[in-house]
Image: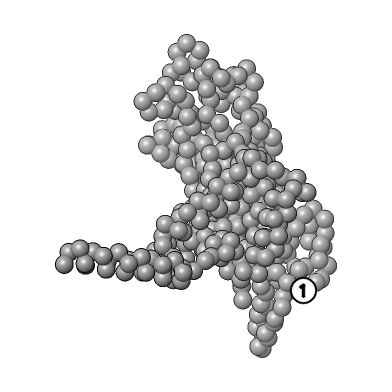
């Protein structure tokens, strides 16, 4: 009886495996990328996404790994970038096919993702930033549940734990908070010591006792600001618009704009004077202003004295115009600065080098109508 039942069991299992193999759904490259992007958006858990798509979680993570590894290779320059190469032509053809599918999800196209990955090397090439976080920093792929635009306030150099290496002691905030908490003139308290914020900087490297040339100032990995633009107000429709130095028409109503605009900067990072103290320090607190930039209006509703404009997309700007005096907001005046006496590393007893910093911006005084701004995009329907 045992021999007979064993003989029947083997064909039964084989039949079941054959049925599963024959009926297993085959996913195209477009479908795999769509599922991976949905997982990156974080609108639902990976387990729930896999149940809805009818796939195993292991398959999702394999596809996600392949997607990120492909982006990493492009970021590192390991793939051929010649426009005539077969691989690039194939990727561009796939990107065009994916346009409509991805655009419907969150106005993200495969062309934009690939172009953004290509453009990440100059900005993040020397930093230990993952490709997903770098894409989120650009605002292309949101990372729900974690800050996507974290900014550091560099407070001072400190001795690393369990070694004599020097590393920067920092406080971080999301950019929407950092432009107020870390703005020049503010004071932050940590471990009963007060730190005065004095300016802006890019990502600072940790000094190395043997590799760093302390004769010349150290330069940041990245520029001191991300964006430099002007916000203009339209007196005709009451909308704010973002643009450059040149005069432009209002994108909402089409009227010519004569407003010179407010110059706005999105800082990459913030710094203090690197001289913590237990003394009381006066703090200049900036104001919080929210401005809306409306895209091209495609629908309008008017009722009595109320008019509502609808557009596919708009931008919300959080602006810190400085503190308010008796006349107006003061803004910030910044200038390029080289700190020849940033901090001495005293625990390196053999050399005790003096760290110098270049490439930053300091605030000498306050100036009317020069602002510091952070931006974020929102879709409107």
Which residue is the extreme one toward the bottom? Answer: 304
**Residue located at (67% from left, 74% from top):** 311
Say whether residue 303 is left or right of residue 183.
right
Q: In the image, residue 163 lies at what x, y percent?
A: 39, 23
Q: In the image, residue 59 lies at what x, y percent?
A: 45, 58
**Residue located at (41% from left, 60% from top):** 57
Which residue is the extreme one toward the top? Answer: 350
Residue 189: quarter of image: top left
**Residue located at (68% from left, 86% from top):** 302
Compared with 89, 152 (above or below) is above
Say whether residue 104 is left or right of residue 251.
left
Disc 1 target residue: 253
Compared with 295, 373 (above or below) is above
Compared with 339, 15 (above or below) is below
Residue 217: quarter of image: top right
Residue 303 is at least partly visible in this image: yes
**Residue located at (66% from left, 72% from top):** 312
Dot 1 crowding, Cα within 10 Å, few <14, some 14–19, many 20+: some
User: Residue 28 versus residue 188: which sits nearer the camera?
Assistant: 28
Q: In the image, residue 252 lies at what x, y percent?
A: 74, 71
């Amino acid at each position: 009886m045992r021999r007979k039942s064993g003989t029947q069991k083997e064909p039964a299992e084989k039949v079941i495996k054959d049925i599963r193999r024959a009926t297993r759904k085959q996913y195209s490259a477009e479908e795999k990328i769509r599922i991976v992007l949905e997982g990156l958006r974080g609108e639902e858990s990976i387990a729930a996404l896999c149940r809805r798509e009818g796939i195993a979680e292991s398959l999702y993570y394999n596809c996600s790994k392949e997607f990120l590894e492909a982006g990493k290779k492009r970021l590192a320059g390991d793939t051929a970038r010649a426009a005539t190469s077969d691989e690039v032509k194939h990727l561009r053809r796939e990107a065009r096919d994916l346009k409509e599918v991805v655009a419907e999800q969150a106005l993200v196209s495969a062309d934009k993702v690939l172009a953004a990955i290509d453009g990440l090397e100059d900005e993040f090439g020397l930093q230990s930033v993952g490709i997903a976080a770098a894409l989120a920093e650009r605002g292309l792929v949101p990372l729900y549940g974690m800050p996507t635009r974290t900014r550091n306030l560099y407070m001072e150099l400190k001795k690393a734990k369990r070694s004599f290496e020097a590393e920067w002691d920092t406080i971080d905030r999301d950019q929407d908070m950092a432009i107020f908490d870390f703005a020049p003139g503010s004071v932050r308290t940590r471990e009963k010591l007060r730190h005065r914020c004095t300016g802006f900087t890019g990502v600072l490297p940790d000094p190395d006792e043997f590799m760093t040339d302390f004769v010349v100032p150290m330069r940041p990995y990245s520029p001191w600001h991300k964006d430099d633009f002007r916000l203009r107000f339209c007196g005709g429709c009451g909308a704010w618009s973002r643009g450059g130095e040149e005069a432009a028409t209002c994108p909402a109503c089409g009227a010519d704009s004569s407003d010179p605009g407010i110059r706005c900067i999105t800082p990459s990072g913030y710094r203090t004077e690197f001289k913590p103290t237990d003394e009381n320090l006066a703090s200049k607190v900036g104001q919080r202003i929210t401005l809306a930039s409306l895209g091209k209006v495609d629908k309008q509703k008017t009722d009595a004295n109320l008019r509502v404009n609808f557009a596919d997309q708009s931008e919300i700007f959080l602006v810190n115009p400085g503190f308010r005096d008796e006349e107006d907001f003061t803004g910030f005046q910044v200038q390029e600065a080289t700190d020849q006496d940033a901090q001495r590393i005293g625990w390196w007893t053999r050399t005790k080098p003096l760290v110098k910093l270049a490439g930053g911006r300091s605030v000498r005084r306050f100036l009317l109508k020069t602002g510091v701004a952070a931006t974020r995009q929102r879709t409107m329907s």
